[in-house]
Image (cartoon, helix red, strand yellow):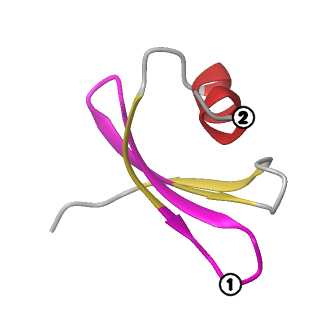
Amino acid sequence: MSLLTEKILKEFPGGEIKKVKPKQDGSYDIDLMYNGVSYKIKTDSTGNIVKKEIKRED
């Protein structure tokens, strides 16, 4: 398990990471399912969460 994954799952225990997209600046966009809710997570280059929002399904 990567450090990034560990940090995310510490915040969302039991969550399922669906997609990890690295950005050019070293940060990441992550799609996560947690307790039946889909989240969009943004991290900085060290894996710290800087933004989290519920992903709306249209």
Rendered position, 25 above or below 22: below
Residue most extreme to the left = 58
Rendered position, 17 above or below 23: above
The dot on residue 52 is none
In this rendering, would 49 be left or right of 17? Answer: right
Residue most extreme to the right = 46
Tell me, yes or no, whether the two marked residues, 1 and 2, touch with CB atoms within 8 Å: no
Q: Quadrant of residue 22?
A: bottom right
Image location (x, y in percent) of residue 4: 67, 41
The dot on residue 24 is 1
Give the extent of the magenta segment. Answer: 21-40
Q: Residue at x 80, y 47 (%)?
A: 48
The dot on residue 3 is 2
Mark 1 or 2, nearer chain start: 2
Front residue of 6/1: it is: 1
Quadrant in the picture for the C terminus? bottom left
Q: Residue at x 34, y 22 (%)?
A: 35
How packed mark 1 is, by other alpha carbons closer than 10 Å (few <14, some 14-19, many 20 or more), is few
Q: Residue at x 20, y 61 (%)?
A: 57
Is residue 3 found inside the magenta-colored segment of the image? no
Quadrant in the picture for the N terminus? top right
Rendered position, 28 above or below 13: below
Mark 1: which amino acid?
Gln
Residue most extreme to the front = 1
